[in-house]
Image: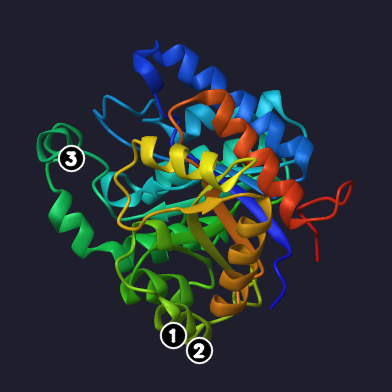
Amino acid sequence: MTLEKLSVLDLSPIYGGVDPTVALRQSVLLAQTAEALGYCRYWVSEHHDMPGLASSAPEVLLAHIGAQTSSIRIGSGAVLLPHYKPYKVAEAFHLLSTLYPGRIDLGVGRAPGGSAHATMALNDHFLQQVGRMPELVAQLAALLGHAFTVEGEPVLARPLPPQPPQLWLLGTNQKSAGYAAANGAGYAFGLFMSEAEGEDVIAAYKRDYKPSVRQPKPEVIVAVGVICAETMEEASACAQASSAAFRRPPIAGDPLFVREKLQELAERYQAAEIMVITDIPDYAKRLRSYELIAHSVFDLGSPACRQT
C-alpha cells in the first residue's frame, strides 16, 4: 500500500525549562506549519501533572489551534475516556465541530495519562471505569450518532454540528482494536508506544470491523516516532538527545532514509496514513524535521494529505 497521508501527533513538550506558554506557542506554530506543508491531521495529547508536557486539556488547546489554522483536521490523541462521562466529551467535541466544521477528530484512549496520585486527584474510580470501557465507547458512539437515550428518552449532546467529529480509538493491543471495530470507528495504532509489532492487531480490527453510518470502511493510522535531519549523522545526534521515553527508538535519518522507512511501514501495516511524533529537545530542529519529512515523502508542491 502506498503512503498517501502524513499527520502529526504533538505532546506539547516543554523543552529546556521554558515557560509552558512558550511550549503552547510552539504547538500553534507546529500546527500552522503542518497545515502549510499539507499534513492531513494535527492531534494533541492529554497528560496530567507531567512536568515536561503542557497539554492537559485537548479540547481547550484544540479550540485555540482551530482559530489559528484554517483547513487541517485537528483532534485529540487522545481524550482519556475512563476519566469522563461520554456525554460531556460528546458535548465538547460537538462544540468544536460546530466551530470548525469538517475538521474535528475525536480520538479516545483508556490510559490514565499521569501518575497514580494524579489519577486519584482526577478520578476516584479509574480502574472501575477502565473495566467499563466497552460501554463508554458505545455510549460515545451513540451520542455522536444522535442515538443516545436515558431511561428510554433521547438525549442529544448539543450543539449539533453540521458534520460530526470522526471517532478514533487509540491503542496498542487487541482490546482497543476491538472497541474500534465494534463501534465503526477509526483505529490509530501507537507503534511508538508498543513493544509488539502490531500487524495482528490491525488485521483483527479490519477483519472484525462493523460499518457505521459515520464510517462505512475501516481506517488505520500508524503512529511512529521519526527524527529527520539533513544528514544521517545529525539525525543520530538528535535521536540521542531525545527526551521521550518511548518503548521503541524512533526512525532517525536523512530524508531519503526516512522516506524509505515510512513507505515500508505503510506496506507492512497496509496503512495509507502515518502519524509522526518527533521529539527533539530543540523547537527549531523539531520543526525542521517535520518539514523534511513532508518534502521527503511527497513530491515538492504536492500536498501530503491526499484526500480520497
Q: Please, what is the three-letter code of the amino acid marked with disc 1? A: Ala
Residue 29, above or below 247:
above
Determine which residue is flagged by label 1: 204
| Residue 189 in the image, given as x and y percentages of width and height | 45, 65
Q: Please, what is the three-letter code of the amino acid marked with disc 3? A: Asn
| Residue 195 in the image, given as x and y percentages of width and height | 29, 67
Determine which residue is flagged by label 2: 207
Determine which residue is flagged by label 3: 123
Q: What's the distance in space between the residues labelled 3 and 1, CA to CA?
A: 32 Å
Name the N-terminal-most of marks 3 and 1.
Answer: 3
Q: Quadrant of the C terminus?
A: bottom right
Dot 2 and dot 1 residues touching (CB under 8 Å)? yes
Dot 3 and dot 2 residues touching (CB under 8 Å)? no
Crowding near the residue tagged with mark 2, few <14, some 14–19, many ≥20 C-alpha atoms within 10 Å = few
Residue lying at 87% horizontally and 51% vertically, measured from the top left: 302
Comparing labels 3 and 2, the label whose residue is closer to the camera: 2
Asked whether residue 172 is in view, the answer is yes
| Residue 234 in the image, given as x and y percentages of width and height | 53, 39
Q: What's the distance in space between the residues labelled 2 and 1, CA to CA?
A: 5 Å
Relative to 130, is 190 on the left or the right?
right
Residue lying at 69% horizontally and 23% vertically, measured from the top left: 68
Q: Please, what is the three-letter code of the amino acid marked with disc 2? A: Arg
Residue lying at 54% horizontally and 58% vertically, measured from the top left: 167
